[in-house]
Image (tube, helix red, strand yellow):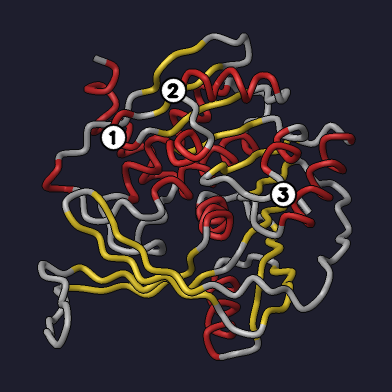
Amino acid sequence: MDALFIGQTYIDVTLLAGHIPEGDDKAVADDYAVSFGGNAVTAAFACAKLGVIPDLLTSVADDWLGRMFLDMAAKYQIPVHGRKVRRSSLSFILPRDGKRSILRARDDDYLHPYPHLNTNGIRALHLDGHQADAALHYAKFCRSEGVLTSLDGGGLRSNTHELLGHIDIAMVAERLCEQMSLSPTDMLDYLRSRGCRIGGVTEGERGLLWYDEEGRVSRLPALPVPPDRIVDTSGAGDIFHGAYMASYLMRPDGRWVDHLTFARAASAYKIQHLGNEAGLPSLSDVRRMKEIYGHAAAN
């Protein structure tokens, strides 16, 4: 096992429509995509597409959507360690004008305890806070073994504070700042106080406010993708996480500014495509995003 990602599986249905019907109204979407979803799950697929295939501990139901998800994972050769639920979780995503509305139906009533996996050779762990018991168990173990631990802090969960005490790389969303009544700068101070070696707050089109290995705070601006090229921002953050994990696993001695710059380019690719699978970049796609937009971001 090279890396382990832990999260909750969704099947994402993304609908591109100029009009959202209400009441007895009807409308026809301009386009749609059906794909895997979930924060750490999408990150795992992004990491695999970039050349580093992680193991994935995630919810799996014995229904047709669950079997479809396993087929998706097999396509990318991702080993899935399923934790059984009764029904698959769904997300309906409606992107519009650079934003997206999401309606979710989630089954996180796990029918069995989390599995204890053989982690021989593991070099990194990535979590999104789902499966709180499993996340805390593996974060404690990996931190004690000197294995890099990463958290996608998309929102406040039951054990976020405790979990952060075992995290090396914490990249959190503005939503977590709002839920904890902290400014982005205050959030960086909080992440430092929990012992996170690298911490950051993702702020959409404003980019990333973060501190590096030396504790220096700076802003990594988002790549300037023209508005008319932006199709679907959903999943861009998840791919950002998967890409910096892939970059770290490929170059563990590299600087974190380089890992995050790589991940920024991966996100820029995603937002130009509808759905998570279409938005998974290859290494050549990441290089192309840097070439097209990188100079403008530097200025």
Q: Which mark is residue 205?
A: 1
| Amino acid type, callout 2 | Leu
* Left or right of residue 123: residue 240: left
Residue 52: percent from left, percent from top: 62, 50
N-terminal of the pair, mark 1 or mark 3, is 3
Task: Give me the residue at 28% from left, 57% from top.
Answer: 273
Residue 167: percent from left, percent from top: 71, 34
* Left or right of residue 59: residue 175: left
| Amino acid type, callout 3 | Ala
Q: Quadrant of residue 12?
A: bottom left
Look at the picture and state if 114 lies above or below 230.
below
Q: Which mark is residue 3?
A: 3
N-terminal of the pair, mark 2 or mark 3, is 3
Task: Give me the residue at 56% from left, 80% from top.
Answer: 88
Mark 3: few, some, or many residues within 10 Å (few <14, many ≥20)? many
Q: CA distance from mark 2 to mark 3?
A: 26 Å
Secondary structure category for the residue under label 3: strand
Mark 1: few, some, or many residues within 10 Å (few <14, many ≥20)? few
Which mark's residue is nearer the viewer, 1 or 3?
A: 1
Residue 138: percent from left, percent from top: 81, 49
